[in-house]
Amino acid sequence: MSILETIFAHKREEVAAARARVPLKALEAALGDAPPPRDFAAALQDAHRPAPRLIAELKRRSPSKGLLRPDFRPRALAQDYRQGGAAALSVLTDARFFGGSLDALRTVRDLGLPCLRKDFIFDRYQILEARTAGADAVLLILAMLPPRVFRDLLACTRELGMAALVETHTADEVQQALDAGARLIGVNNRDLHTFEVRLETCLELRPLIPPEVVMVAESGIHTPADVRRLAAAGVDAMLVGEALVTAPDPAAAARALLGG
């Protein structure tokens, strides 16, 4: 069983337990108390910030690298990211494999940057959870979603006024995302079945994504040289986690990636 399949199997159990604790109708009733969603995609097209704009990730640990930041404090880290020039935040909310939580998202939501709930989403329930916690966008990973489920989840985000960052890894997945009308497409340089990382993946797939669709490079971005390669290829935004989370000074690390 691959890492993705292992996570997905656990996630089904997790969502079933969450439904038992908080029924779907209770989540739907709480939507009216959620803060209005902010325009996540617009933040990645901000003309005042040079491309690629930075989505800075809050992540305590990962299955491949283990504990990344022993003194993980989501709000302080998010403040550092904001000072470093981040355009948006990505908050890992998976508890078992990444040490995250929806509470971390709630903690940083009021700092002014649009927030993405990054998790392994396969059910409308999880999108409602995200919205009630204040998320402005969610991640939809095509590699783990049957076509009909993907389209239903994409429609759900639109109904709620949220953005969906549709994660792809191959040319076929990019085409699936475009055919469904995705306006925000991520290309993950990490193969989620093997966890092998190649920065060239997003560079090779960039020409397949029309200029009116926001393109986000994910994973494998560590140095200013990497960022210059993305900029030269016309990448709109980049999602960076480990290079920032593990830095002694995350604000300075963000500024360095963005060219100072």
Image (tube, rainbow, N blue to C red):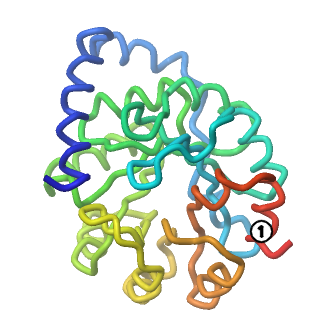
Q: Is residue 219 above or below residue 95?
A: below
| Residue displayed at 58% across by 57% down | 242
Dot 1 amino acid type: Arg
Q: Is residue 234 above or below residue 118?
A: below
- In the depicted view, which residue is nearer to us: 35 or 86? 86
| Residue displayed at 39% across by 42% down | 119
Residue 101 x %, y %: 49, 29
Please indicate whether residue 9 sits to the left or right of residue 62 in the image.
left
Crowding around mark 1 (Cα neighbors within 10 Å: few <14, some 14 to 19, many 20+) is some
Q: Is residue 55 above or below residue 179?
A: above
Residue 232 x %, y %: 63, 90
| Residue displayed at 22% across by 77% down | 172
Residue 57 x %, y %: 59, 50
Residue 179 x %, y %: 25, 70
Badge 1 marks a residue whose secondary structure is loop
All told, the count of numbered labels is 1
Please indicate whether residue 185 sits to the left or right of residue 145 in the image.
right
- In the depicted view, which residue is nearer to us: 151 or 16? 16
In the picture, the quarter occupied by the C terminus is bottom right
Please indicate whether residue 177 sits to the left or right of residue 114 in the image.
left
Q: Quadrant of residue 37?
A: top right
| Residue displayed at 79% across by 46% down | 80
Please indicate whether residue 153 sits to the left or right of residue 47 in the image.
left
Q: Is residue 200 above or below residue 123?
A: below
Residue picked out by circle 1: 49
